[in-house]
Amino acid sequence: MRVKITYTVQLEEVEAEVSEIMSRASNDLDFCYQELTRLQLDLNTKTGDIESHALMVDKIRIKMAKADQVLEDCQNILIGLVNTKKQLQEQDDEIQDG
């Protein structure tokens, strides 16, 4: 079950924070790539048993889904950052025009 966690950072720290969050997705995707490559080699050389290969495919798919969820969170944060910066710019423009 996914739950929403909310915390605050300075506006200028948002991109670095997103980068840090993205590292989780990157680590999961790296795991998937490494295991998928190993799995392909095992299948090509008929090494190991089919059942363990099927279980590894499931594990890879779960990790990929987790990485996708993390990337979706990052995308939503970045969209929020864009919207916030637009609002701040509009407020600055109104003050200058006023």
Image: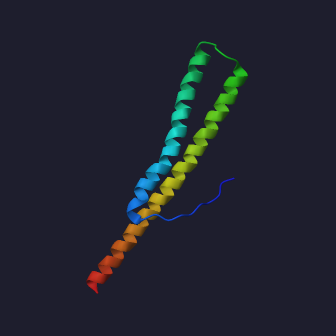
Residue 88 horizontal/vertical position (percent): 37, 73
What residue do we see at 61% from left, 18% from top? 43
Direction top: furthest residue? 45
Q: Is residue 87 left or right of residue 43?
A: left
- Residue 29 appears at what percent x and percent y? 52, 37
Q: Quadrant of the C terminus?
A: bottom left
The residue lying at 56 percent from left, 22 percent from top is: 38
- In the displayed structure, does residue 63 sit left or right of residue 75? right
The image quarter in which residue 40 lies: top right
- 60 left or right, relative to 22: right
Question: Is residue 97 shown above or below 73?
Answer: below
Q: With respect to residue 23, does 80 lie above or below? A: below
Across the whole image, how many numbered discs are drawn on residues? Answer: 0
Residue farthest right in this picture:
51
Q: Residue at x 27, y 83 (%)?
A: 97
- Residue furthest out toward the left: 96
Q: Position of residue 17 (x, y in %)?
A: 45, 55
Horizontal side, residue 55 vs residue 66: left or right = right
Residue placed at 53% from the left, 52% from the top?
72
The location of residue 93, given as percent across then percent down, is 30, 78
Placement of 95 over or under 17, stated as above or below: below
Figure coloring = rainbow
